[in-house]
Amino acid sequence: MNTVLGSEGEIRLLLGNEAIARGALEAGIQVATSYPGTPSTEILESIASIAKELGIYVEWSVNEKVALEVALGASILGLRALTSMKHVGLNVAADTFMSLGYSGTNGGLVIVSADDPECHSSQNEQDNRVYGLLSYIPVYEPSDQQEAKDLTRDLFIVSEKFKTGVLLRTTTRLSHSRGPVKLGSILKGNRSAKFLKEWRWTLLPINARRLKRRALDRIRELSKFHEQFKYNYVKLDGDEDFGIVTCGVPYLYVLDSLKMLRILDRVALLKLASVYPIPTRLIRNFVKSVNRVLIVEEVEPFLELQIRSIAPKDVEILGKDLVPRAGELNVDIVTNAIGSALKMELPQKEARLYAHINELKSKIPKRSPILCPGCPHRALFYSLKLALRELELTDRVIISGDIGCYTLGYFPPYRLIDTTICMGASIGLANGFSHFFEGLVIAVIGDSTFFHTGMSGLANAVYNKAPFLLIILDNSTTAMTGFQPHPGTGYTATLDRTKKLLVEKVLEGLGVGHIEVANPYNIKGTVEVIKRGIRYVLEEKEVAAIISRRPCVIYELRRRKMKYLSTVTFQVDYDKCNLCMTCISEFACPAIDFDGDKISIDMSLCTRCGVCVQVCPIGAIKPRRGG
Amino acid sequence: MRDKHVNLIITGVGGQGILVLSRVIGEAAIKEGYQVKIAEVHGMAQRGGSLVTHVRIGKHVKSPLIPKFKADMLISMEAMESIRCLDYIKPKGYLIINKYILVPADTSISIKFEDLLTYLKSLEYRLIVLDAYRISSQLGETRTTNMVVLGFLIGSNLLPISKNSALKTIEATLPPRFKEVNFKAFNEGYKLGLGYRIEKNLSLY
């Protein structure tokens, strides 16, 4: 059953991301682009799954900047285009984003930023609504799945009316929650691409100066337009002395809180979907009629700063002094904020039980994210550790990591990742380290991330003679976000065959002097490859590269519709096992258990990669054919 | 439409079919005419990490997240994970635990299911231990543990969802090649649930 297809009037339980995708389909988009990133990935995945039927061009772009440029190109030609990315992806695309704030657009262009308050799966929780202020691009925030669908659809009309790109901000909580959505009808986009020469597409200073003034005018117009915007909602009887202004999912928390506090009837409410630019008259009237206002929004005081700047002096405005600026909100946090604002006595919930449960929780071991059984990254990390040990470099190495499953190499027992800053930064930082650090510098990056923002850093390393070892973990997919294809896979977003960019050819083309491919499932071989790479770096004082190539085991099994890699099973020979604990404390595969007495292998978790057989120093783990 | 409001939290580790279980419950509740919100948190690792979903079923459901001590029941597909979510269950709420424990690979602490159980029994929850993992193992497909649990929830009447709606949803949502084994697992759980309903005389949730 395809989640985003379905006929008009039908009610579907959709993820926020699926709702956004559906909204775009109902607007007749002809182009959708993205680079995978949690929590945005399902938007493009949903569209890709039906792209052929509807004649939509979709692509996983090499990175977010390119994704936005492909969409802008389509927009300039008059087509409706959607581009989606995680919040930090917009940093990569920021150059283009700022410029299109000046140039404007032609066909409807909706840019979705999926923010991640609480950093559930990101390096920061930046609030991308702020980008609106910087770029003169309007920003919208839906509160639930139905609104996400409808708003996305209608934003294409807003975009075309004002000839501007629009930013739709969603968050993890909306993107990854399901709610009922009543479907509208899908519009099959059938515009033909036309290019009209216009001065605004060329941002020479002479044009840019004019465009800046135009952008400012546009923002003023949009502010007026937002006075009547149908997704803004006001509940104001006129006799309330306290009101709440909110937006996004926190609106739902506010509703639940007011209900729990039994004051839903006594509090005025303003829910904004157009968070930039704000409708000034609407807001001024609202705050004036209540005198005290609490602004409930997630992460930065974005509405708060705008509202403070226009509110009359005698109105009391509360915001980030009561609502935390760090982390995600929820009903409990919002209830406390409202309670404090109204100086209400809140019942202390189950205080004793709470303390008791907290004590109990502290005794349960954390389940830190771990590499899967059979993960080729684990095998590579193990070999890397051995190679460093053999060359006595363990204490004289900096390992510069990147964004992907392999970031987990930071955790014990590997403890190999020393830095992780952002996409592609492993190579950039390694450039910086290697010019000054006395020991060895290693950069570790995945294949998809290498294509994303790794290549330019490597060109820099070759050009400026930065001596470090580059390890590319090539698992033939974008694993962490759920197996999206990338330029190195030979497949497109719609799973059509395409040219496959071989990593080693790219390295060769960039002028890397030493390139070797290793199979990480072969420990001995991989250790030798790593050692050769290190020696090259130390002797030649220039960058060397290793490609550790083995498909992600989960992806491989799923693709081949298999439960295990082979029919071989593995057993511990208890006559031999001397409990040296190498397999537990150095290799740490989740399929290998130690119950306090003996080591055993859980065959339901084991993927049959066979690496542990090589890891055991005394050969106590034994394969058995056809078991 | 029955006028019920149920908040449930489903927890366990990645790979136990928690997202699927949540979705099937949600879709089936929609068939019954309810509003539904499901919050999922997709973690960092593909497999083996803690996973929690919030499922809210009712006439008017707003926030996707359940406040602390407001969940009517906690379903824990893995025993240790139940502890991490205890502060969501309301006093005397249902705590349904699949008899399965997975100690993290990077810990040396030895925790046994029985010890956890003894402890949980001392608290004032309506505790139900389901041998769902064993049942699914016997069916030769441990990936159907979630369907055993679903069958129990429907059979026991703990969820305001009919058997018919549940089965229809499984058929519509899950891959056809697993239909037969999913139905079998569901029915095993359903029988257990039915027994529980009779034993506790649960007419309606």
Image (cartoon, coloured by chain):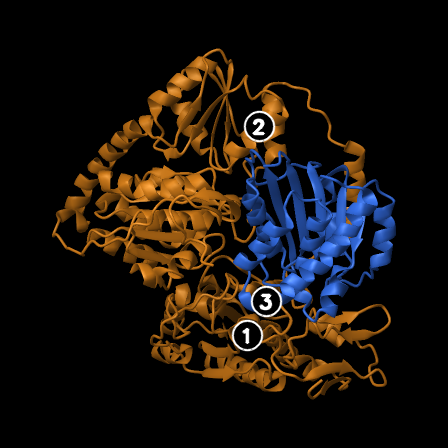
Chain colours: A orange, B blue
Q: CA distance from mark 3 to mark 2?
A: 50 Å
Q: Is residue A22 visible?
A: yes
Residue at the (24%, 38%) spot, across then down: A215
Chain bearing mark 1 = A
Q: Is residue A314 visible?
A: no
Q: Specify whether B144 is left or right of A621.
A: left
Q: Nearer the viewer, residue B97 or A393?
A: B97
Q: Determine crowd level at label 1: few under 14, some 14-19, many 20+ residues with C-alpha closer than 10 A.
A: few
Give residue B73's position: percent from left, percent from top: 71, 43
Q: Nearer the viewer, residue B55 or A33?
A: B55
Instruction: Tell me the residue that label 1 is attached to.
Output: A561
Q: Residue furthest left?
A: A197
Tell me, yes or no, whether dots 3 and 2 are on the same chain. Answer: no
Instruction: Tell me the residue that label 2 is attached to.
Output: A322
Q: Determine crowd level at label 3: few under 14, some 14-19, many 20+ residues with C-alpha closer than 10 A.
A: some
Chain bearing mark 3 = B
| Image quadrant assignment for residue A128 | top left
Give residue B18's position: percent from left, percent from top: 63, 55
Residue at the (59%, 20%) spot, across then down: A263
| Image quadrant assignment for residue B125 | top right
Q: Specify whether A246 is left or right of A356.
A: left
Tell me, yes or no, whether dots 3 and 1 are on the same chain. Answer: no
Q: Nearer the viewer, residue A523 or A29?
A: A29
User: Which amino acid, mark 2?
Assistant: Leu
Give residue B100's position: percent from left, percent from top: 76, 60
Q: Is residue A157 above or below residue A33?
A: above
Q: Nearer the viewer, residue A403 or B144?
A: B144
Instruction: Tell me the residue that label 3 is attached to.
Output: B178
